[in-house]
Every structure is written in structure tokens, then in C-alpha cells.
């Protein structure tokens, strides 16, 4: 603890060290239980199951036909058939009361018991029947088409051994031997506590400064997926006593406890104090050598693991996958499916995390070979996490991974539902509508990655996507997009005209500060919400500011140096509008539809051209052709015109 009351991270533990600590300290396992067969799927057998019957339990026919004495068929052929008298019939589920004498046969159904005296089944295909007799055209050998009792499984034989996982085939086997219930290892009850003064239940009103509780619901789903039983112990604020009460309650009724939030080194982060004061032996490690997920608490109480997860959802889920999921598998004796992986080529250089193991999320782009597109996002970017396909591991001792190197991607899901179309480029609400129309009308699924206009154009040039949406104004020619496409080395036909979007200045309703244009940015009382470098809006903004600098007779760098907020980088139109709407900024440049969504006033600057660039290698893809058809469709244009500031040439 330092002088201002903050907990200081000491030596950070590696993933492997944390796992060893938990293996030694978290020895508690749930008691085995008996479950019905219809509840046994996916469970692990804790007591070896032996067969109480032979399987099959009697000699039975494997084919429809006739139960015969095999020697009666010797010499039979199509040219010299033999004749047998039919003396009865036996169906599955019944038994024949008599026996089969020489020169006779009994009609028999598949699965029916073999009558006394018979030693083979003659398939019906090799007979003809008339007047109570059959003509036999093929001989059979003793035991032909007969499944003898115990030939599959003998009485007293092992059906499933201890440690076996019950799958669909195992359910069938257990049922066939008459087993109604099995003893399995208990599924761990996992207590979940979500902490933070800022969190509220999804569906409730979101007041300023509040966020919806993601971790409770995310962790409940993750626990179920891992084979555990989630038990929610509610949400509590950053209050030591409330956290202590919740933790004490969870310790009494669960096998493993997860607490999210309040684990870092801030003054308001009290989870580690509550754990340290209540648990025995208490905290084993505070902090992991990973990114994201550093502020993780590893602890134990009387053989039960207590894990404090970071409050950011991305960090919490990464730590869950690396630490908690294997722990759930271990104490429930489940083998776990393991992570599915694939090899992919990295699309850009990735620098290491300076001594920390980095779990970096990626998009997998499909083509001739898979490519891994890194997603550099904060630990709180749950939307980015949900759209990612998996992650790569950047070792702690690695300085960098070079572009075009092959990497192993650990997948979040099966990665079997691959999108028909991949788009990259500038974010646009009309594009979201277009992709919805494309799916509804043509059944084509698409993925859109918002990487900015320049990022999208570069991705097309490198062959990483099918299309890119761009709106780039060339200052020399004062035309949109075409000059940039040529500079990227792409032919002119790759550029397809899209639509126009009205750009302008978003300001608070009522314009309380009397803003008239971008020239007002030099005022000291104004804060600007600027777009990110590489976006078309940033290019437009800088062009306008250069014009203002020229009018004022000062250098561009001196002008922007006076603008409060110029160096900020908001990545979407919506984030600019949100900053103005929530009072964090006084003005920002965005499209009119974003300003309207936040109830802001709008000072138009002009219309920009939002166009699409086609990857030459994708021009003949059906998905691309249908995309262009939907772009020109009446349905899309009617829907897009409902957005503020959108028009078509």
C-alpha cells in the first residue's frame, strides 16, 4: 500500500503460475450426483458402469427372412432351388413357442428372437413363397444373419469407465443395457458478484455516468458454456461491507466464486481488500503478466477458488478463458473441448506488450488463405470483442510479430458460418441499411469493419476485403475518391459511385455558445470533438482548417495548436455526436444523421461523396454483384433517404 491508500501491484504472476497456485489451493470439488439418463449428456461418469445384461439379451435375427436349419439349405441355387414348409411367424417383441424341425422354416422379422432348432436366417430376397412353402435359391451357413446373445456386450462387462464423458453414443449404450440413472461428477456451482457504483441492469434507464452490467450476464453464459452452474449474488457498489456480505454469502453456497470489478490499484477498488480480509489463506496473487487482464486477483478460501476479475468485459472474458474455464473443467473432471485454432497470415506488424503476454483479438478474413486482421481496442470494447473471430497470443518475450508472418488464431467459436462478403472502410449508417437489404433480399451475409476510409482503401489494395466504403477529398483536384483509388494502384473501374452524405458541425440544441462555424474553434471557451486520422471526415476538417489558417495569415500547425480538443480522435460519427450531446465537447464535425440521433443542431458544411471500391479479385463474386444491385435498388434508396442528410445523384 502506498501513501495515498492505493494498493501497489507487486510481482505479477504468469498464467502458468496462477494455474499452479489454484491447483494447490483450490482442492474443493463438488460431490458426485446421480442423474437421469436424459440429463446425462455432457456429464463425466464418476463410477464405472457395468452391464447387468447381455447385449443383445437373446439370439436375434439381423434381417427379415426365414429362420432355418442351415443344413436344410445346402446345395440350393437359382437353377436347383430347395423347398421348405413355413410353419409359423415370429415378430420383434414376441417369441415363437415351438421349434423349427428339419425341412421347415419360420418367417422372422428383424430383431425377433431366433426360434429353437433354427441356426440361421435366410434373407427374404433369396426366396419365393407360395402355398405355405418357400423356394430357397441360396444356401446359408450356421449363424448367418444371427446376432448371438452377448456378442455386443456381455453381462458384467464395463459399459462406461469412470472418467468417460457421456455423449450421444454413450446415452444409446447406457439405454441399451437398461441403465436409467448414472453417477456423475458434480457440476461446480459458480457464484458471480458484479461490483461497481456505475453498473445498472440492462433494460433500465441509463443515467449519465452509468453503464449496463455486462459482466454478470456474460459470466453466467460463460460458466454454463464451460459446464458449471452459475449462481448470481447480485450487483453491489464499491462498498467494502456490501462486497464482504456478498462474498460471505457466496462462499457458503458455491464451489467457486467470481467477483468482477474493483480489482485494480485505484482508491475505489476494494475487492482485493474484501477478499484479503475474509478468505483463508486469502490472496495468492494480485496481478497477472497478461494484456488484457493485468488487474486479476487469484485467491482461495478453505479449498475454494476466489477469483477477482477486471471490470472491463474484454479483460474479464480473457481471464475467464485462460484461468476460470480450465479450473471448472478440472474440478468437474470434464476434459473440455479445447480451443479450435487455425493458421492465418498477419495483415500488419504487431509490437509486443513489453513483458506481458498479449491476447490480441483478430478478425479472420477468408480468401485463398486465411488472414488475421488485428483489432487494437480497449479492454472495455465489448462490441469489438463480439465481432472478433478469435485472438492470437503475443508472447511476453517477443518484441514484435512482422506483417505477413503466419500466426495461430485461437477461435472464439466454430468459425463455420463464414460471411459471404467482407467490407472495410468508413463507418456509415446507410451502409448498415444496405447490408440488411442485401441479407433480406438475397440471403447474403456480410461483415463490415470500421477502419476508416484510408484503412479500407489500403485493405482493398492488399486484397484483404471485397469492398471498401470511402469518402476522401483530394485537396489538389477538389474531387472525391477517384484520385486516391489511382494512387493506390487500382484501376478506375474499381470505384463505384454510392451516395451523398451531408457533413456539418454538430452543436448543442439552442446553440448556447453562439457557434457559427469552424472559425470559432480558436475561442478558448470551446472544446472540439475531432475525428480520427485516416477518416474522410478528418481529411475534410483539416482542409477547412487550412483554409481558415490561410485567411488568418497563420500557419496550420499554429492554428490547430490553439484548438482545444484538436488532438482528440473519435472513431465514428456517433461518438462525435455523443461527445457534444453529453457535454464533453461543444462542437464536432459529423454526418447530419448522427447529429439528429442525439437531438443536436446542425450547421451544414457541404455534401460529400461516399463511394465503394471493389477488390479486383472479387469483381466476379456473386455477393459483390448482388451488393451492387442492392445499392442501385429502389428499396435501399427509399430507406436511406429516411436518414437525415442522405441523397443520391
Image: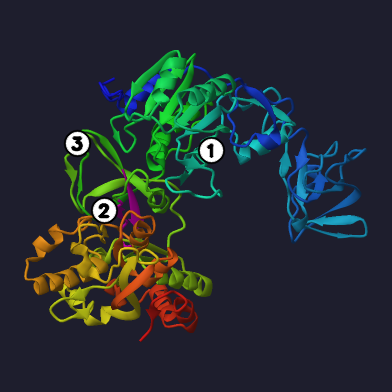
Magenta segment includes 364: yes
Looking at the picture, tell me which residue is in the foreground, 69 or 244.
244
Determine if residue 466 is in view: no
C-alpha gap between disc 3 and disc 2 = 23 Å
* Disc 2 residue crowd, few under 14, some 14–19, many 20+, Cα 10 Å: some
Give the vertical position of 645 relative to 179 (above or below): below
Q: Position of residue 379 (x, y in %)?
A: 34, 43
Up the image or down, 568 lies above or below 336; here it is below
Q: Circle 1 sits on which residue? A: 220
> Could you say whether the residue bearing mark 3 is in a helix, strand or loop?
loop
Which residue carries the number 3 mark?
Answer: 354
| Residue that carries the numbered disc 2 in the rendered image | 345
Per the rendered image, the range of residues in magenta is 360-375
Q: Main secondary structure of the magenta part?
A: strand
Query: Residue shown at 47%/73% (left/top)?
Result: 438
Residue 193 inside the magenta-drawn segment: no
Asked which quadrant contains residue 19, the reply is top left
How far apart marks 1 and 3 lie (CA) works out to 33 Å
| Contact, mark 1 vs mark 3 (Cβ under 8 Å) | no
Image height of 391 relative to 633, above or below: above
Q: Secondary structure at mark 1?
A: helix
| Quadrant containing the N terminus in the rendered view | top left
Helix, strand or loop at label 2? It is: strand
Amino acid at each position: 500500500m502506498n501513501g495515498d491508500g492505493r494498493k501497489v501491484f507487486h510481482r505479477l504472476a504468469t498464467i502458468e503460475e496462477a494455474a499452479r497456485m489454484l491447483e494447490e489451493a483450490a482442492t474443493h470439488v463438488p460431490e458426485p450426483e446421480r442423474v437421469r439418463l436424459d440429463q446425462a449428456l455432457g456429464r463425466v461418469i464418476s463410477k464405472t458402469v457395468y452391464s447387468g445384461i447381455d447385449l443383445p439379451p437373446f439370439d436375434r435375427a439381423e434381417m427379415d427372412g426365414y429362420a432355418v436349419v442351415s443344413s436344410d439349405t445346402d446345395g440350393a441355387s437359382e437353377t436347383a432351388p430347395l423347398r421348405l414348409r413355413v410353419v409359423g411367424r415370429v415378430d420383434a417383441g414376441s417369441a415363437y413357442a415351438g421349434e423349427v424341425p428339419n425341412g421347415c422354416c419360420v418367417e422372422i422379422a428383424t430383431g425377433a428372437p431366433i426360434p429353437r432348432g433354427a441356426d440361421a436366417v435366410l434373407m427374404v430376397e433369396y426366396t419365393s413363397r407360395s402355398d405355405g412353402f418357400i423356394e430357397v435359391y441360396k444356401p446359408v451357413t450356421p449363424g448367418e444373419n444371427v446376432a448371438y446373445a452377448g456378442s455386443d456386450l456381455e453381462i458384467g462387462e464395463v459399459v462406461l469407465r469412470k472418467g468417460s464423458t457421456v455423449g450421444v453414443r454413450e446415452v444409446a449404450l447406457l439405454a441399451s443395457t437398461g441403465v436409467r440413472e448414472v453417477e456423475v461428477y458434480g457440476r461446480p456451482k459458480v457464484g458471480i458478484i458484479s461490483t461497481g457504483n456505475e453498473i445498472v441492469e440492462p433494460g433500465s434507464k441509463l443515467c449519465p455516468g452509468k453503464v449496463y452490467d455486462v459482466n454478470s450476464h456474460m459470466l453466467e453464459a460463460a460458466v454454463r458454456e464451460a459446464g458449471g452452474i452459475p449462481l448470481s449474488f447480485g450487483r453491489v457498489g464499491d462498498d467494502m461491507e456490501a462486497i464482504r456480505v456478498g462474498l460471505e454469502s457466496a462462499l457458503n453456497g458455491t464451489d467457486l466464486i467470481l467477483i468482477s470489478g474493483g480489482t485494480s490499484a485505484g482508491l475505489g477498488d476494494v475487492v482485493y481488500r474484501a477478499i484479503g480480509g475474509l478468505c483463508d489463506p486469502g490472496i495468492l496473487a494480485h496481478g497477472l503478466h497478461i494484456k488484457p487482464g493485468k488487474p486479476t486477483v487469484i485467491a482461495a478460501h478453505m479449498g475454494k477458488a476466489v477469483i477477482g476479475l477486471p471490470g472491463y468485459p474484454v479483460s474479464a472474458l480473457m481471464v475467464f478463458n485462460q484461468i476460470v474455464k480450465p479450473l471448472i473443467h478440472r474440478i468437474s473432471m470434464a476434459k473440455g473441448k479445447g480451443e479450435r485454432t487455425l493458421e492465418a497470415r498477419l495483415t500488419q506488424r504487431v509490437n509486443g506488450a513489453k513483458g506481458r503476454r498479449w491476447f490480441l483479438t483478430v478478425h479472420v478474413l477468408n480468401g485463398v488463405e486465411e488472414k488475421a486482421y488485428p483489432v487494437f481496442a480497449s479492454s472495455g470494447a465489448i462490441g469489438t470483442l463480439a465481432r472478433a473471430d478469435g485472438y492470437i497470443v503475443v508472447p511476453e518475450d517477443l518484441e514484435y510479430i512482422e506483417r505477413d508472418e503466419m500466426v495461430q488464431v485461437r477461435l472464439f467459436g466454430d468459425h463455420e458460418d463464414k460471411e459471404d462478403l467482407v467490407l472495410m472502410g468508413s463507418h456509415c449508417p446507410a451502409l448498415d441499411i444496405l447490408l440488411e437489404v442485401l441479407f433480406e433480399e438475397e440471403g447474403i451475409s456480410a461483415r463490415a469493419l470500421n477502419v476508416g476510409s484510408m484503412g479500407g482503401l489500403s485493405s482493398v489494395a492488399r486484397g484483404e476485403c471485397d469492398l471498401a466504403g470511402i469518402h476522401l477529398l483530394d485537396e489538389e483536384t477538389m474531387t472525391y475518391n477517384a484520385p486516391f483509388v489511382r494512387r493506390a494502384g487500382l484501376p478506375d473501374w474499381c470505384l463505384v459511385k454510392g451516395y451523398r452524405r451531408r457533413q456539418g458541425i454538430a452543436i448543442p440544441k439552442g446553440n448556447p455558445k453562439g457557434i457559427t462555424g469552424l472559425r470559432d474553434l480558436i475561442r478558448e471557451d470551446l472544446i472540439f470533438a475531432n475525428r480520427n486520422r485516416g477518416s474522410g471526415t478528418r481529411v475534410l476538417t483539416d482542409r477547412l482548417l487550412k483554409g481558415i489558417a490561410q485567411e488568418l495569415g497563420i500557419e496550420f500547425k499554429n492554428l490547430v495548436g490553439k484548438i482545444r480538443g484538436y488532438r482528440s480522435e473519435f472513431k465514428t460519427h456517433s461518438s462525435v455526436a455523443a461527445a457534444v450531446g453529453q457535454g464533453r465537447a461543444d462542437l464536432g464535425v459529423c454526418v447530419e444523421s448522427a447529429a439528429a440521433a442525439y437531438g443536436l443542431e446542425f450547421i451544414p458544411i457541404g455534401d460529400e461523396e461516399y463511394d465503394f471500391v471493389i477488390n479486383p479479385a472479387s469483381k466476379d463474386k456473386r455477393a459483390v454483384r448482388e451488393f451492387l444491385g442492392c445499392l442501385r435498388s429502389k428499396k435501399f434508396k427509399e430507406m436511406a433517404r429516411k436518414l437525415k442528410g442522405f441523397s443520391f445523384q
